[in-house]
Image (cartoon, helix red, strand yellow):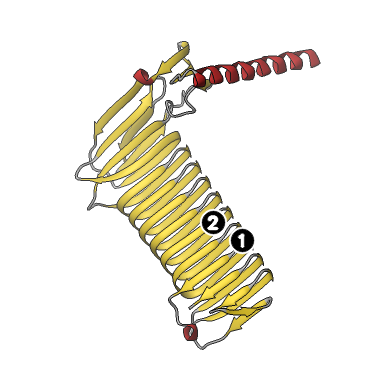
Amino acid sequence: MNSTRKKFTLIASGMIVIGILLTAIGFFAGAKLSIVNTEDGFQALGNHDRKAEEFSLTEFANIEGDLQDTDIEIIPSNEYKLKIERLAGTKVTHKITNDTLVLKESDHEPLWQIDLNFGTLTKKVVKIYVPKEVTFGNISLKNRFGDVRLDGMKVERLTIHSSEGDLTLNDIQSNQLTIENKFGDMNANNVITEDLNVEMHDGDAKFDSVRANSTVFQNEFGDLNFLNFTSEALTIQSKDGDIEIQGMLLGNSVIHSNFGDTKLQLLNKESNLSYNIHNDFGDITVNNNRFEKNASHTTNSQHKLDITSTDGDVHVTF
């Protein structure tokens, strides 16, 4: 048993060494190819093996994508159209069923490959063109590796689950917006939504001109920046990263930060916002007035702000 285990270990180690050597040789030689284990055996595929496909589509009201290693983009247009770029030996299938465009990668993707160009050659690209005046019902995108970009869309419910990649949202109107991104940055501009729910594990997030009735944001590692922001209920939980908010906080707002500075530049009047700030290790400054450990202010307003910081400075200006 031990002998068999040693053989497998030696074989695996040998394959890793060969892969590293081939990658290094290809990189220094300027190679732009991938060695892929296809159904026809190992093949060296280059730029000439990339395929570009274009499909005219009938109208649909929903989008459902389940992809593995793909850049996804939804683009405002005057027609329904799909463009797919892929490497030979890989495949993205599409169909319209029950008023839903369904995108899925082939179940027979290469199990073994060596990229001599660090993944740019094998990366698939999916571009979905939709009429800009259409309001969609449900858009659900799942993607393991790759960027996701949406522009100029109206959708009842938008859900994005990404394991690794950057997310970009521009000019989005949605009743419910749910985003989970494990590794990668997020940028959102001109977003209006009833419910904004974001969970990030490692990445920076920047929101500009975002209005939400309810905002829930959870982040493990990374900075959070809200510019021109308005929310009627806000909950932020950050383990490690700076938080900066410029805008109007209405209703109940709760911010909890373990490590990192918290900076708020509010359009609220201090006389119209009750607040309670607690900081274990770090300074507290409210309108250039310094406090130790705690700062509080009570009004008859229904708008309330609670900030709890474990380690980092807290600055609030009205």
- Residue most toward the bottom? 300
Sequence-wise first label, 1 or 2: 2
Closer-to-camera residue (154/118): 118
Q: Amino acid at mark 2?
A: Asp
Q: Which numbered tag is attached to residue 260?
A: 1
Quadrant into which the N terminus falls? top right
Task: State the image quarter where residue 63 is shown.
Answer: top left
Which residue is rendered at x = 56% and y = 53% of the image? 222
Q: Position of residue 255 (x, y in %)?
A: 57, 67
Q: Residues within 10 Å of mark 2 (few under 14, many from 20)?
A: many
User: Residue at 50% across / 76% down in the picture?
Assistant: 317
Query: Visible in this render: residue 282?
Result: yes
Q: Is residue 115 above or below residue 237?
A: above
Amino acid on which disc 1 is placed: Gly
**Circle 2 — which element?**
loop
* Above/below status of 240 relative to 298: above
Apparent side of residue 78 relative to residue 86 in the rendered image (left or right): left
Q: Position of residue 125 (x, y in %)?
A: 37, 33
**Could you tell me if the residues under marks 1 and 2 are in contact, i.e. CB atoms within 8 Å?**
yes
**Residue at the extreme left:** 78
State the residue at coordinates (48%, 60%). Answer: 225
How many angstroms separate mark 1 from mark 2 (CA)?
Answer: 9 Å
Q: Nearer the viewer, residue 289 or 47?
A: 289
Q: Quadrant of residue 268?
A: bottom left
- Asked whether the viewer can see residue 1, the reply is no
Kindly identify the residue that appears in the image at 54 percent across and 56 percent down.
223
Residue 286, horizontal then vertical, whole percent: 56, 78
Total numbered labels placed on residues in the image: 2
Residue 223 is marked as: 2
